[in-house]
Amino acid sequence: MPIYDTSSIAERIPLACTTGQFGLLYEACSISFREEVSKEEFCSYASSFHHDIIRYQPTPASVVSMGGIVRYVWISDNNQKGLSAAIDVSGTIIGLRLAHLAEYPITDQLKSHFRYRFPFHGEWFTYWGGKNDLVNYHYAYENQRYAYDFIILDHDCSAKGDPLLNESYFAYGKPILAPCAGRIVRVVDNIPDNVPGRVKNEQQPAGNYVEMDHGHHEFSLLAHLQYHSITVVPGNYVQAGDVIGLCGNSGNSSEPHLHFQVSNGSELLAAKSIPFVFENGLELVQGMTVIGK
């Protein structure tokens, strides 16, 4: 089976949408996609969705390549709508999503008082992050709107070996660091790690976590940590860069990763997530690779 350059296929998708070539786009989709929706249904909905879109922004909002599938996201020129497409190595479109994008311009423009370091060493990949639903599923929820999820990739894969073992994942067991100086206010350390890809613990969504009070009504949360790996207790004062635990797969998590957010209060469900500034001034979006020092 030939391996295609997905970028050459991807660049034609938003153009096909804005020029009404919905039939051609439908025929480029996988058999399973076409079994789920008829050509008539697809073309009708896509035409209605695009009635007020002149063009999509030329550069994709994000590109994520994992496990032989590349997912692209484009945003319309008026920022009101978005398009995502998943393309496999054969050049087949295996998924398409058209989405009306919610906007929260008042909070989107806020900036944290403190600058935060990356809470890890080495190279990590931003799997979820940004200011719309297509690049950051957290964005729909006020209490985690500006959160990030980080994983480690090697040759577009997050694991090597048995995918049912946490130890196969590159992020598992990596030290997690305090992102800013502060006082530890809450710790959970007794939740077992999940089996990757199996049942997630939705009853304890954050899993094992550490929450810190940095002052100025800014509280950071580092979640899904490894069972019995946390090295701090409430009342401890830590400096930026201090190890607070290890990356795990606890809580509402399908594979080892780090969930990181800053909120305006210490109650996870009641507090509001706030946009925060990294030390280097970088504003992360899904698909970006970052390096923690």
Image: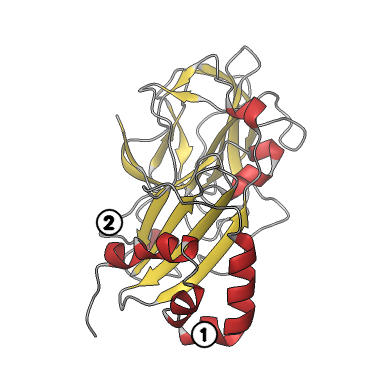
Left or right placement of residue 277 versus residue 40 in this view:
left
Query: Does residue 199 show up?
Result: no
Whichever of labels 2 and 1 marks the residue nearer the N terminus, that label is 1
Please tell me how crowded label 2 is: few (under 14), some (14-19), or many (20+) other residues with Cα within 10 Å: few
Q: How many labels were placed on the picture?
A: 2
Residue at the spot of label 2: 154
Q: Is residue 285 visible?
A: yes
Residue 163 drawn at (x, y percent): 41, 70
Q: Secondary structure at mark 1?
A: helix
Residue at the image position 66 percent from the left and 34 percent from the top:
104
Q: Identify the amino acid type marked 2.
A: Asp
Q: Nearer the viewer, mark 2 or mark 1?
A: 1
Q: How is the rendered protein coloured?
A: secondary structure
* Kind of residue indicated by mark 1: Ser
Question: Residue 32, labelled with which disc?
Answer: 1
Q: Quadrant of residue 16?
A: bottom left
Instruction: Look at the image and tell me in which quarter the C terminus lies.
Output: top left
Q: Position of residue 249 (x, y in %)?
A: 52, 54
- Secondary structure of residue under mark 2: loop
Residue located 39% across and 24% down the image: 241
Q: Mark 1, residues whose alpha carbon is within 10 Å: few (<14), some, or many (≥20)?
A: few
Q: Position of residue 137 (x, y in %)?
A: 59, 50
Name the image quarter holding the N terminus: bottom left
User: Which residue: 67% across, 46% down?
Assistant: 140
Is the Cβ of the residue at disc 2 closer than 8 Å to that at disc 1?
no
